[in-house]
Image (spheres, helix red, strand yellow):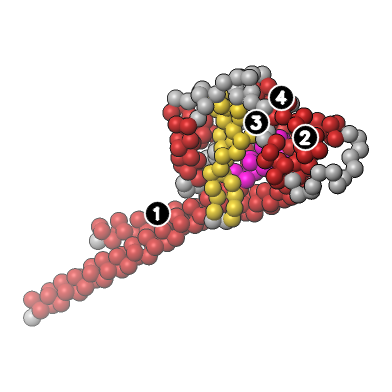
Amino acid sequence: MGGVRELRGRIKSVGNIKQITRAMEMVATTKLRRFQDRAVGSRPYTEEITSLMGHLVAVLGEEVEQRPLFRAGEGEGTLVLLVNSDRGLCGAYNTNVFRALEAWMPSAKRPVRFVCYGRKGFQYLNKAGYEVEHYFTEPPLEQIDYRGAARVARFLVEDFLGGRCAQVRLLYTAFHSMVRYVPTWVDFLPVRAATLVGESAAPAGDVILEPSAERIFEALVPLYLETRVYNALVEALTSEYASRRVSMKNATDAARDMQKALKSQYNRRRQEGITKELLDIVGGAEALR
């Protein structure tokens, strides 16, 4: 009956694992709803500020192209903000981002430096031998707010204006739905005026601006950049928990199937043992006659 005892222990172990993965799935689902609300809630503001930026660019015309944030930086190479998770157990979430990074690297403007948000990305870059300019740890990604995103945006802008790079790009996971989240590259700096005009919903000249368009534009550009970083961080966080929820659900289902198979095997072994004992008893009774 040693095999039966072993199977009983395995059934218990798989059951414990199933309870853990089920609990992690429920936690991920709860957090996902909260982060999804933040991600979806930030989109209208992002769209409106982008539309207003496009309108102002159309009003100001070619003058915008001469502003420092709208032309290539004085430095060389590319600065990349890489957004990953602080923890694992989220399926292929981190791996997909790393694949997108490696696919882009051969065509990158050299040298390439990195700014990280997320421990997994920081560990990957160090192991791969890439130069990490800064690793953001405060606040943790799960606690990110607009103020934290604004600090990240200011760091990127200062590096760009300081002549240390020619462009700044963001690599994060865009959240599309509960089952679709795609690693996405975004050109952050320099800001492309033509793209903003194309995204503007309002035609130039249909709004009276007070104070002047120049003053509004100068005040709006930092908010626009901060909003883009905040939206990227929140969408990446939402994608992480969506991936973790699916991963934990798959693990729970696999544990349930394994437990069912082990119980079936356990019942067969136990029945075999009972049958063998009955045969021994019958055989002993026949020998005594």
> With respect to residue 152, does 24 lie above or below?
below
Q: Position of residue 55 (x, y in %)?
A: 78, 42
**Residue 13, numbered circle:** 1
At x 51%, y 34%, the residue is 121
Tell me the amino acid under the disc marked 2. Gly
Disc 4: which residue: 68
Q: Earlier in the sequence, mark 4 or mark 2?
A: 2
At x 70%, y 29%, the residue is 70
Circle 2 or circle 1, nearest the eye: 2
Spatial distance from mark 4 to mark 2, Cα to Cα?
15 Å
Spatial distance from mark 2 to mark 1, Cα to Cα?
68 Å
**Residue 61, numbered circle:** 2
Quadrant in which residue 129 is drawn: top left
Q: Position of residue 113 (x, y in %)?
A: 54, 25
**Image-based side of 86 in relation to 129, left or right:** right
Residue 155 visible to an observer of this rendering: no
Q: Secondary structure at mark 4?
A: helix
Q: Position of residue 216 (x, y in %)?
A: 84, 34
Q: Which residues are magenta?
A: 225-237
In the picture, the quarter occupied by the N terminus is bottom left
Tell me the amino acid under the disc marked 4. Pro
Circle 3 or circle 1, nearest the eye: 3
Disc 3: which residue: 189
Toward the front, the furthest residue is 62
Tell me the amino acid under the disc marked 3. Leu
Q: Earlier in the sequence, mark 4 or mark 3?
A: 4
Spatial distance from mark 4 to mark 3, Cα to Cα?
10 Å
Circle 1 or circle 4, nearest the eye: 4
Spatial distance from mark 2 to mark 3, Cα to Cα?
19 Å
Q: Position of residue 260 (x, y in %)?
A: 37, 65
